[in-house]
Image: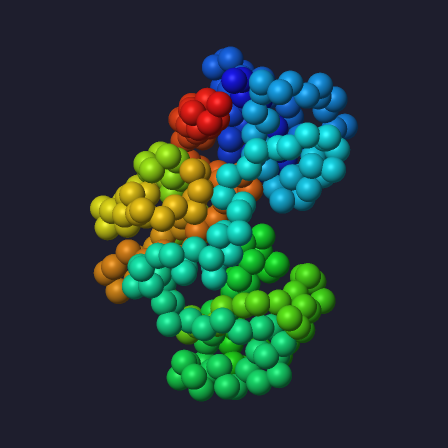
Amino acid sequence: MKLTWLIDIDLMAEEQTGIVSHLKSLGYQVHRLSAALDKPRIKHDEETIYAFLGSFQELDAIRKHLKFPVATYGLNRYVNRSGYASHMPPEWFLNENSIMATWGLLQRNPNRFFSMFESDRLFVRPDDGRKTFTGQVFEKSNIQDEMLFLDRYSSVMPETLIWVGEALTVGPEYRFWISDGKVVTWSEYSWNKAAISSPTAPGKILFDMAQNVAILEWQLDRIYTVDITEYNGEARIIELNSFSCAGLYQCDGKMLLETVSRDILYEWQAEV
């Protein structure tokens, strides 16, 4: 079997510029994908695996363009929070007491949820792993305005499944990449990119939690990511995400792609 990568360079452009050339130096064929480029003309080879790395939007576009399957990792039915949380120890999770509801239920009676958690701040995130909207804090004092903003500028619908919990103050957040039962690399991340100018290594308790996830009998997929933070001196999982559509931030991208390429080929060769 051979491996060809389909890389969305728009997603990789800021901090992982050397990935494409590195993959080519290892002998893998790479097709660059971008909203600014024409879609590549690829003649399907049955002995080749076509693996994708990029945004959800680019994945949808390349799937429509190509007439053959594209391999993705961590994008199965378990990538929703209701999926992976049902198979993992609940005490591993931040906001382990959060509850599932719908956007419409929150809109109609937000005070019920503030009372339930005895807090003036709620953390709300979608169940969907494709991120209908970014998880965020809602303040009791202006929740109507915040919900109206999401109604207008996201694809959230009244029936959208969400998780609601108390907003908690946590430490730095780290993404770990897991492939074939091992922790490969990591990166600190922040929604405020300017906040991370010189990223530091995660502490031992975060590494240990990532390792616990990697060796758990149940696995989301062969390759995926897990976001972990520290809360009250303990490591807690924020969420699990796909590998194929997750940003790389400042991880060791070259080592990551080198490792997962070997793991992908091993998986497919074992099935032949």
Q: Is residue 175 left or right of residue 59?
A: left
Instruction: Give above or below for 261 relative to 77.
Output: above
* Residue 38 placement (x, y as % from top left): 76, 28
Q: Is 196 left, or right, of 217 in this rendering? A: right
On the rendered structure, is 207 left or right of 157? left
Q: Which residue is drawn at 40% across and 84% down?
A: 118
**Residue 48 point in image, percent of width and height:** 58, 20
* Quarter of image, res 152: bottom right
Inspect this view and state whether residue 247 appears. no
Q: Is residue 140 visible?
A: yes
Q: In front here: 175 or 40?
A: 40
> Looking at this view, is 76 or 188 the one in front?
76
Horizontal relation, residue 84 to residue 106: left or right: left
- Give percent across and percent down for residue 80: 51, 56
Q: Quadrant of residue 165?
A: bottom left
Colour convention of the picture: rainbow
